[in-house]
Image (cartoon, rainbow, N blue to C red):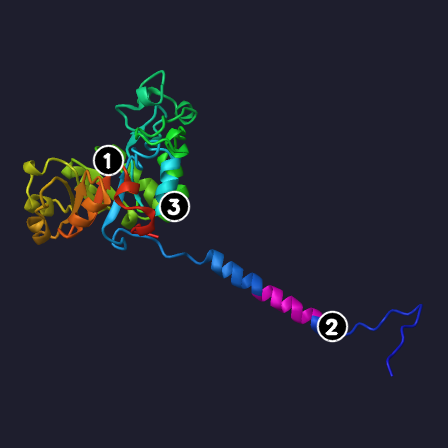
Amino acid sequence: MSKKFEFGKQPAKGFNAPLIAGGLVLVGILIAVAVFVLTPKDRLTVDGLNTPAVAALGGGSDSLPANSLEAVEENAKFGYLPAVDLAKTADDDLVLANAETAQADLNLAQPLNETPTDKFLSSKIPPAKGKGDSEEQTRPGTPITFDDAMKRYGKYLVFAPRVESQEVLSDVLDITEKRSNPDALIVRSTSLEVLSAAEEAGATGMYIGEVTSTTPGELKEAGVSMVALEAGEEDLDTDAYDSAGIRVWASGVASEKQLKALEQDGIFGALTTDPFAVQPPAVKSNK
């Protein structure tokens, strides 16, 4: 016979098993979610890239506003490496921009190195220089600092910025250490000194200077891991670089067909201003 509730008396405090069980289930779910959120995801590194990798010069300046937030976002979405330009503002902040053309491109009142960071960030980057009429190709871009770009995407992308001075390299490495890791950084440069310093810091150096002025042996002696060779009508001669343990990138690749042909030459990757034409998203290298 069930016990009736008696008015005026407090009910006996029993052990509510269903409630406790439900609470334990909830705690278990919260712990599982916390573990999933807090456990580091697999990071993309240079050595972990699928080949041929595709690096988007200026973030893909033929199809997206050059060196813009939007370009980096699209690179992240489709697995391209942001091969951005870097420059400094008057506030000594490192930003995504071409130092030589930024004043004209962004309609700045002064050269970029004399422009405060807030003025730079409030400007607009002109639309892509390609001939397409899509919304992306007619929309201006948003300027961004290198630190912000790395904060947003440094854990998910391999960046390949161009660096031509030890001063800029020092800032690049500091930001990379804070936001990502040097093993997810490719430094492009014409300076062997810059590339050697980058390699010593744990990053990967890519020589983009005149290959006629240096030899594979000299690059190897400088500790450089990669070289960019201009892609032309002829097959790329990569044998000497392969023998020196230097990975070859093809520069100026313009189409998917050309990339497939160069892949037969054993290239590690391609540098292009239009990554969508070279490696359409359906066959992108890094997902």
Nearer to us in this view, 248 or 254: 254
Q: Decide if residue 85 is on the left or right side of residue 262.
A: right
Residue 77, label in figure: 3
Mark yes or no: residue 79 visible.
no
How far from the left and from the top, in percent, is residue 125?
Answer: 37, 27
- Residue drawn at x 32%, y 48% is 181
Magenta-colored span: 19-28
Secondary structure of residue under mark 3: helix
**Label 2 to label 1: alpha-carbon separation:** 66 Å
The disc placed on residue 16 is 2
3 vs 1, front mark:
3
- Vertical position of residue 175 compared to residue 12: above or below: above
Q: Quadrant of residue 117?
A: top left
Q: Residue at x 33, y 45 (%)?
A: 177
What kind of residue is marked 2? Asn
Instruction: Give the residue drawn at x 10%, y 47%.
Output: 220
Report the residue that reaches farthest toward the bottom. 1
Which is more foreground, mark 2 or mark 3?
Answer: 3
Residue 229 lies, with reference to residue 6, above or below; the image says above
Q: Residue 127 at what x, y percent from top left?
A: 36, 28
Relative to 41, does residue 213 appear above or below in the rendering?
above
Mark 1 lies on residue? 163
* Type of amino acid at the residue the image marks with label 3: Lys
**Mark 2: few, some, or many residues within 10 Å (few <14, many ≥20)?**
few
Q: In front: 175, or 46? A: 46
User: Would you say residue 25 sits in the magenta stretch?
Assistant: yes
